[in-house]
């Protein structure tokens, strides 16, 4: 049975610090689901995971599993496994003994702990390298061993702290496939810290965004792109267009771009920033008139900057687009590309 992981008012002021690394965070990860925590470096992501794992204790707030507080439960008894960015294997032990370490520590014979570990070795597709010294395995294999080691404790909750960020893109994508496969076979509840929006999109059901220790956004990933709760969240999600203006408190944002209707905004009237998702804007002769003032390849696609008055609006162009510098174009900004936040 999968469990629900939740934290309530979770706060950590590290020794010697005056500001909280984690500030009253409330977050619930439903049973068997995966939530990705995104946030800039230093925003408190690792702190959150360490508090949940019991590697560090909170200054305030609670960690709960299925509603039961576990603040006073020792790390090894929480049923929580953790994988770090570096595999942190025991260098003098074989692959199999690394995976079976917890069984051995709990009193199993060497033979028995290896037998039990072998199952997890197979699960991460490393069946034939069990007897190898960990110093002889590649970086990708080492991270698989670390994953197997954390799974061998049969944790109900698995915490992954940027576990694949040191791997090259091909290995990373293989690890994503592996995690998806494990999610289909096992029943863990996952909390994944990542820098990589792509990784969050592939693996997670929802994204939680931490900014300066505060949880500023929690939603499905698509919503984080198109309806970020704050400017900081928009920037973290790669948002490029921020247009200063005024929100009328009802449904219209006014700026140099004109009147823009935005649905589903619950902000009072006042100064507000209109956000336009560059991937969703298209060029259309009937749209808002502007001139292409910059063109930048981003790989397969490219981003055009379209000058409208004193504004510069970024638009992502499809591969093979024939737009050129100096072209007069029209911007078609669909409702789904628009959102409004306070400045
Ligand atoms: P992230 O994982 O998002 O990069 P961290 O949780 O590691 O961020 O750190 C959040 C903040 O807490 C940072 O300002 C960091 O310097 C500080 N911090 C983390 N661990 C400690 C510690 N053990 N002692 C003091 N400050 C810490
Ligand atoms: Mg970290």
Image (cartoon, grey):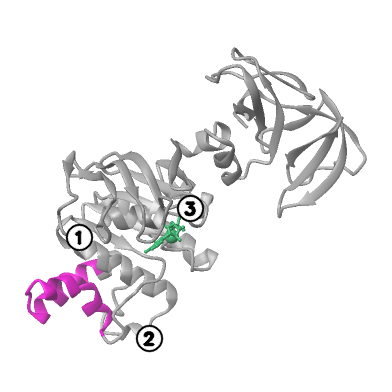
- Tell me residue 103's x, y (percent): 13, 71
Q: Can you tell which mark lies on residue 97?
A: none
Name the front one of labels 2 and 1. 1
Q: Nearer the viewer, residue 256 or 22?
A: 22
Give whichever of discs 3 and 2 has the lower sequence position.
2
Q: Residue at x 49, y 68 (%)?
A: 167
Between 238 and 62, which is closer to the camera in this rendering? Answer: 62
Q: Which mark is residue 75?
A: 1
Give the mark toward the camera: 1 or 3: 1
Q: Which residue sits furthest right?
A: 326
Q: Is residue 57 left or right of residue 241?
A: left
Q: Is 176 positioned to the left or the right of 305 in the image?
A: left
The reply, left or right, for residue 220 in relation to residue 298 is left
Quarter of the view holding residue 61: top left
User: Distance of mark 3 from mark 2, alpha carbons?
Assistant: 28 Å
Q: Which residue is mark 3?
A: 199
* Disc marking residue 136: 2
Q: Quadrant of the N terminus?
A: top left
């Amino acid at each position: 049975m999968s469990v629900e992981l939740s934290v309530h008012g979770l706060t950590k002021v590290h020794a010697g610090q005056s500001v909280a690394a984690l500030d009253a965070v409330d977050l619930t990860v439903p049973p068997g689901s995966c939530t990705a925590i995104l946030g800039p470096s230093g925003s408190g992501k690792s702190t959150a995971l360490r508090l949940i794992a019991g590697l560090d204790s909170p200054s305030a707030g609670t960690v709960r599993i299925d509603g039961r507080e576990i603040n006073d439960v020792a790390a090894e008894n929480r049923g929580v496994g953790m994988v770090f960015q570096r595999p942190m294997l025991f260098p003098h032990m074989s692959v199999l003994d690394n995976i079976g370490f917890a069984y051995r520590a709990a009193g199993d014979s060497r033979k028995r702990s290896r037998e039990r570990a072998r199952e997890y070795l197979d699960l991460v597709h490393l069946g034939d390298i069990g007897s190898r010294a960990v110093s002889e395995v590649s970086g990708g294999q080492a991270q698989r061993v670390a994953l197997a080691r954390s799974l061998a404790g049969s944790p109900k909750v698995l915490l992954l702290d940027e576990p694949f960020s040191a791997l090259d893109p091909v290995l990373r994508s293989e690890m994503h496939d592996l995690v998806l496969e494990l999610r289909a076979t096992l029943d863990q509840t996952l909390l994944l810290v990542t820098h990589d929006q792509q990784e969050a999109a592939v693996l997670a059901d929802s994204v939680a965004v931490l900014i300066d220790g505060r949880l500023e956004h929690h939603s499905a990933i698509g919503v984080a792109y198109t309806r970020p709760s704050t400017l900081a969240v928009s920037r973290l999600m790669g948002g490029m267009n921020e247009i200063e203006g005024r929100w009328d408190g009802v449904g219209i944002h006014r700026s140099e771009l004109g009147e823009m209707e935005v649905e589903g905004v619950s902000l009072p009237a006042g100064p507000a920033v209109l956000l336009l998702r560059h991937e969703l804007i298209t060029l259309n002769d009937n749209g808002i008139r502007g001139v292409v003032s910059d063109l930048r390849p981003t790989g397969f696609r490219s981003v055009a900057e379209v000058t409208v008055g004193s504004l510069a609006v970024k638009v992502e162009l499809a591969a093979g687009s024939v737009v050129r510098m100096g072209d007069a174009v029209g911007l078609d900004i669909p409702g789904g590309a628009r959102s409004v936040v306070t400045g």
